Image: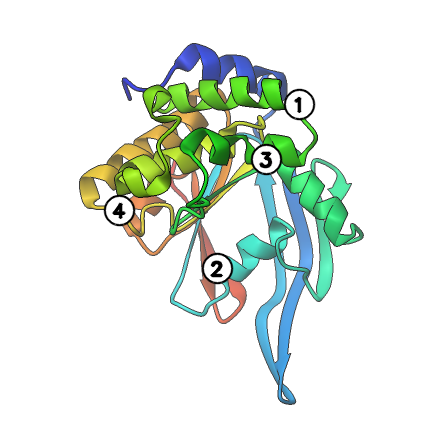
Amino acid sequence: MLNFINRKWVYAHFVMKTVGAKMNESIVQAQNLEMTYRSGGVETHALRGVNIDIPKGEMVAVMGPSGCGKTTLLNCLSGIDQATGGQITIEGTNLIDMSDNQKTKYRAENMGFIFQTFNLLPVLTSIENVELPLLVSGTGTKDARQKAQKALESVGLGEYGHHKPAQLSGGQRQRVTVARSLVNEPYIVWADEPTGSLDSETANEVMELLTNLNRNDGLTILLVTHNREVAELSNRIIHMKDGIISSEEKIN
């Protein structure tokens, strides 16, 4: 159990979206997902007819060799990239038919993101980085600041709100990223190689944080990883190869 998680805060902010949710109730569904890149008359099929269903409260890991379509799948499912074919629904909302502006707003209000390279704005402090999704979705500045502070406290960084990324260790920067992913009470958190830039001890801390949020608070997580040990902390591992799902395995 991580001693730096403020469980009362986490529970209070996720209970509205997790209480009563059935494990087999889908939060993400995709059918016949296609992603084709075209360059100089050459087509590259990054995703080829992918079908995926993620129930509420599940932690899913996606594994496979480089170039197999893992990150492309995450980017399409989350609306960062526009799939060239198929359907995607999140909590019953059709992502495919949204405009870019609509998807940006929807992500800010309903999704959290954790990236290998942190994606923190270097000119902003920790608390300013954490409150960004709230400000994008129209939350007032005072309310956004209060929620961002609580999110930082929940990952043990309550006293680091005025530090800029360059003043933090790699582990601290990733915990700021986790706080940012939680601040909007998301339906789902997308994590792309969340431990890829961390030493083993810090990686274990970050994964313990994420697994506790999943197991104890019902947070739905899809993570992309090359690390088998990280993947085995999930409920299910999806294996990809050449743009398709080649196999799946249940973990626990």
- Give x and y (percent) for residue 6: 38, 15
Residue that numbered label 4 is attached to: 198
Q: Amino acid at mark 2?
A: Lys
Could you tell whether 30 is left or right of 200 in the image? right
Q: Is residue 20 visible?
A: no
Cα–Cα gap, marks 2 and 4: 20 Å
**Mark sitting earlier along the chain (3/4):** 3
Name the residue rendered at 70%, 40% in the picture. Answer: 105
- Observer-nearest of 250 and 241: 241
- Return the disc, 2 or 1, that comes first in the chain's sequence: 2
Determine which residue is flagged by label 2. 70
Residue type for callout 3: Pro
C-alpha separation, residue under disc 1 versus residue under disc 3: 12 Å
For disc 1, the neighbor class at 10 Å (few under 14, some 14 to 19, many from 20) is few
**Relative horizontal placement of residue 38, taking residue 124 as reference (left or right):** right
Mark 3 element type: helix
Q: CA distance from mark 2 to mark 3?
A: 24 Å
Q: Look at mark 3 in the image and give the residue it sits on.
A: 133
Residue at horizontal 45 percent and vertical 48 percent from the top: 119
> Dividing the image into 4 quarters, which one contains the C terminus?
top left
Residue holding disc 1? 140
Mark 2 vs mark 3: give the one in front.
Answer: 3
Label 3 vs label 4: CA separation?
A: 24 Å
Expressed as whole percent of the image width and height from the top left, the position of residue 99 reads 78, 52
Q: Residue at x 61, y 48 (%)?
A: 78
For the residue labelled by badge 4, is the local secondary structure a helix, a strand or a loop? loop
SS state under label 1: loop
